[in-house]
Amino acid sequence: MIKIIYILFISFLLSSAIADDALMELYDAHNYSALKKTLDSYSGANSYEIIFFRAVFNENSQEAKAAYENVFSHTSGKLKRYSAKKLMDYYYANGYYDTAKKYQKYLVESDARESGTQYEKSPIPLKTATREELYIQVGAFGLKENATQLQNMLKTQNVKSTIVEKKINGKTLFLVWIKGKSDFESTLNQANSLREKYDLDYRIIKK
């Protein structure tokens, strides 16, 4: 009897995980009509994934914000980044820029960790360590010609950039980097300015 209950419990956990993955795939694809329909079929479930996706369709912004904060505080990985993005947008839209930047900083650093471009600080003593440099990555291309095209566009706007060739997950990419400022906050402001002017997504790289 106990064995049967255990098997049923494991089956429930596996089916819940598959359901959560399906919701994330629909969300990433911006297929909101299918997402809503699928979400409605899980009316009895109450995982953090379900809490987040229900908040996406909640027209009460305060209730949605509270749900995102709950999810952000208790989860990790992709779901935590989803919540951080929603909270960043909420606080920017309502004029709470300092709070919004906290979530934006989390997203930037999390994205860097995921891509493997953020390196651990050198164990060399501070007196002899080389100062950490910050760069803003505004493009990653499989073809160098595409990276050069973006670099030339930036050059017309008097924005200096460098093309860096890297192998990531066995694939050669040509990355367009712009030198950042001397500290993270200033570099983050610089990156936001570039995004607003040229509609460029970015990552902040520590080297």
Image (tube, rainbow, N blue to C red):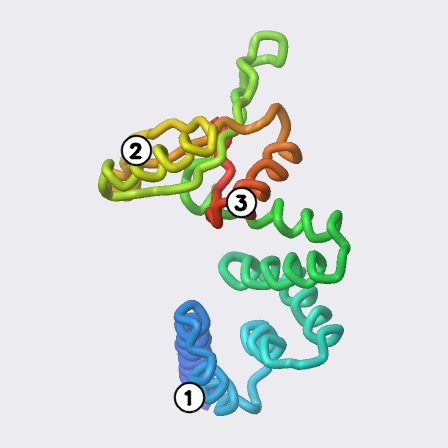
Asked whether residue 51 appears in the rendered view, the answer is yes
The x and y percentages for residue 40 are 52, 90
* Residue drawn at point x = 38 percent, y = 27 percent: 162
Numbered tag placed on residue 92 in the rendering: none
Q: Nearer the viewer, residue 172 or 141?
A: 141
Task: Please give the residue where the numbered disc 2 appears in the rendered image.
Answer: 166
* Residue drawn at point x = 72 percent, y = 79 percent: 60
Asked whether residue 10 appears in the rendered view, the answer is no
Q: Is residue 200 above or below residue 151?
A: below
Quadrant of the drawing holding the N terminus: bottom left
The x and y percentages for residue 46 are 59, 81
- Contact between marks 1 and 2 (CB within 8 A): the answer is no
The x and y percentages for residue 126 are 62, 13
Task: Please give the residue where the numbered disc 3 appears in the rendered image.
Answer: 197
Q: Nearer the viewer, residue 92 or 85?
A: 92
Q: Nearer the viewer, residue 201 or 114?
A: 201
* Residue drawn at point x = 29 percent, y = 34 percent: 148
Quadrant of res 175 = top left
- Contact between marks 3 and 1 (CB within 8 A): the answer is no
Q: Nearer the viewer, mark 3 or mark 1?
A: 3
> Marks 1/2: CA distance?
51 Å
Amino acid residing under circle 3: Lys
Whichever of labels 3 and 2 marks the residue nearer the N terminus, that label is 2
Amino acid residing under circle 2: Lys
